[in-house]
Amino acid sequence: MLTAQARRTRPRHHDERHRSHRAGWLRAGVLGANDGLLSTAALLVGVVASGASQSVVAASGVAALAAGAASMAVGEMSSVSSQRDAELADLARERVELVETPRAELRELAGIYERRGLNPVLAHQVAEELTAHDPLAAHARDELGLDVDDLARPSQAAWTSALSFSLGALVPLLVALLVASGPQEAAIIGVTLVGLAVLGATGARLGGADPWRPAARVVVGGALAMAVTFAIGTLFDVNVA
């Protein structure tokens, strides 16, 4: 029986929190929010710098939000659908090969385990055990790098991107609507840079990475983008009433 001191000093099994399973929705969500925030802010900065009226600024922001969200959804749906089609095609091909050439597939699976360091006898035994349990899942995981229960999800990616883009775009749009006069460009730029820093740091932390470099990267990139659109806007003298 362990004493109280022994129990206190005994090493504890650490809680392993892996984050790779978040990759799909994290990528779509962070990309959408960053894109919505920056693209809408950059457009609004250019429109405001051109001297356009408040109604034009508002209309431009709303149009940018709607068009951007739709574009992100369609783009993600198309991209992830292509990925899923490729995954399903690979699984269908593997399913046929398992029926037509089961011995060759077993040797192929055993060869994979040998290359990973198992001795030939153990590799063959592991391949047989996994094949007896679920041959398609074993080949999908170890030969194709796929999880049959976690294939690409086009609808999830599309909705995540559209929603996150809209939420990101709302930030500079609301600032433009609330700050109708005075330093409107400065307000949009300031809020956007803060938002980009928060998004960059949050995405990095959720992914288990250091937050500073990603935050600095998106802030510098966002500042350059808005500087370009501001310069373009100042070339025009719209002033539409």
Image (cartoon, helix red, strand yellow):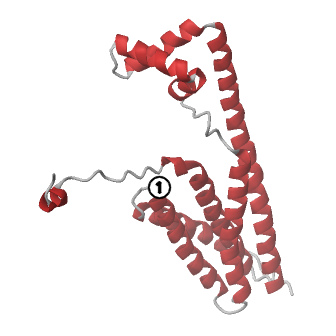
| Towards the viewer: 73 or 99 | 99
Q: Secondary structure at mark 1?
A: loop
Residue at image point 62% right, 37% down: 149
Q: Position of residue 65 (x, y in %)?
A: 76, 68
Residue at image point 53% right, 23% down: 143
Q: Quick check: can you spot residue 218?
A: yes
State the residue lying farthest toward the bottom. Answer: 182
Residue at image point 68% right, 57% down: 160
State the residue lying farthest toward the right. Answer: 241
Q: Position of residue 234 (x, y in %)?
A: 69, 77
Q: Is residue 86 left or right of residue 113?
A: right
Mark 1, Cα crowd under 10 Å, few <14 / some 14-19 / many 20+, is some
Q: Is residue 25 left or right of residue 69?
A: left
Q: Tag 1: residue type?
A: Gly
Q: Position of residue 111 (x, y in %)?
A: 44, 14
Residue corresponding to mark 1? 207
Q: Quick check: can you spot residue 42?
A: no
State the residue lying farthest toward the front. Answer: 1
| Towards the viewer: 195 or 157 | 157
State which quadrant residue 54 falls in. bottom right
